[in-house]
Image (spheres, rainbow, N blue to C red):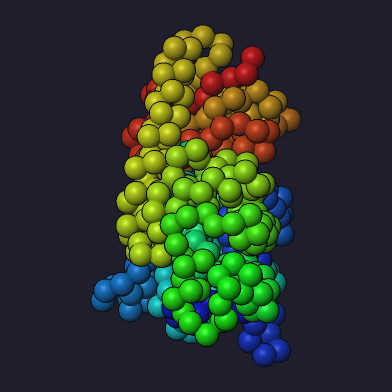
Amino acid sequence: MARGSAETPAYHQDGQRRSPGSQEVCSVTLLDRSQISRLARNGKAPQVSLFMPTHRAGRDVAQDPVRFKNLVTRSEAELEAAGYPSRVVADTLAPARALLDDEFFWQHASDGLAVLLAPGHSDVFRLPATPEELVVVGDRAHLKPLLSALVGDGAFHVLALSQSSVRLFEATRDGIREIDLQDVPRSLRAAVGYDYEQRSLQFHTGAGPGKGGMRRAMFHGHGEGSDEAKTEVAEFLQLVDTGVHALIGERGCPLVLAGVGWVTAMYRGLTRIPDVLPDGIDGNPDRMTPEELHERAWAVVGPRFLEATSASVARYEELAGTPRASDDLATVLRAALEGRVETLHVDTGQQVWGRWSPDVLEAEIHDEPRPGDRDLLDVAALTALATGAQVFADQPGSVPGRGPIAAVFRY
């Protein structure tokens, strides 16, 4: 798989970079439900979960590798304190140490970074939101900080469509980042081929291919053109949709379209993306910077997220004090295990360390993490997510109820 260029900082889906003769160094992946499920199932110990803010520009960019090195050093100390052999410690942390030397990676950071390590394997996620700095060493990956990039807090995509350019972005309320389109055609000409385009030009304009003005009249004007021209565009958009669906189709995030009206309408009519918003950004997106697209897209999609969160909070408050809702952690854990959680709010800024025994349906909570402990908020969120619950990753202090977790039950 090709590496992203400096002009197009890339998210890679299942992408890998290897040094000669080494184990897997790192994979930078798009985050979706399938990734979360895979990570939650991985029981190979030890597992190290590293989270930190990163910077897109400015002097702090040069300090990000230093901060990351400090996290790796902390991880090494915790692994050694847990009694793991030096060989296992070195094998587990090798991908993180290799990442320290990847100058390209640090020059194209997003707002946050998550690195999940296990012996012989690693996953790296560039996050579009800023996590708190955190190191967790245990038998399972710590995944709760990833939920804010997946569900409930305004994660969405923007697809900027024109006949001469295709750009795909991942965004949240706080930022936007372009996704590497890999094999998706970037223009109508790339999709239908040079010879096909030349024949169409001659047919529709009666002119040869030599004059750029005639070319612009057909492919870059404001009208829809003839039926044959629209057929070409439809074929182009079908190819685009196949590639875009492969990248984001299972992520469950809404998609905002940017483009002239007839092009976006045609795309809506053929796409397999399940959640394309009926409103979009009208106009030629080629003239819009990512920042302009982000501002206009959030105006479209933001109210939807705010409404969903507000409705969920109101639903909880309506049912609070009845058997259909609870902010008691042990009660929520039992309901999640039984598949009864309908909606869940969890505080992404807190950890509740302890142990959960499904056999006796009891939670043992500790003030400080002990060997073998897990963040029980993380356990509840992942268990509920696996059973189809709607999970809201709330900012610290914004969870309804009296604590760091609150749930509405299906029955």
Q: Nearer the viewer, residue 241 or 18?
A: 241
Specify whether residue 370 is in view.
Answer: no
Q: Horizontal and vertical percent for residue 368? A: 45, 46
Image check: 285 left or right of 5? left
Q: Horizontal and vertical percent for residue 93? A: 58, 73
- In the image, is residue 47 above or below residue 151? below
Residue beneath the point at 47% across and 68% down: 217
Image check: 266 left or right of 50? right
Question: What number of labels is visible?
Answer: 0
Q: Horizontal and vertical percent for residue 49? A: 54, 59
Residue beneath the point at 34% across and 49% down: 296
Judged from this view, the residue extending furthest toward the top is 322
Q: Nearer the viewer, residue 366 or 255?
A: 255
Image check: 127 left or right of 32? left
Q: Which image quadrant: the C terminus?
A: top right
Q: Horizontal and vertical percent for residue 232? A: 65, 62
Residue 243 figure quarter: bottom right
Residue beneath the point at 44% across and 12% down: 318
- In the image, is residue 294 above or below residue 69? above
Q: Which image quadrant: the N terminus?
A: bottom right
Residue beneath the point at 42% across and 41% down: 301
Residue 192 figure quarter: bottom right
Specify whether residue 61 is in view.
Answer: yes
Judged from this view, the residue extending furthest toward the front is 206
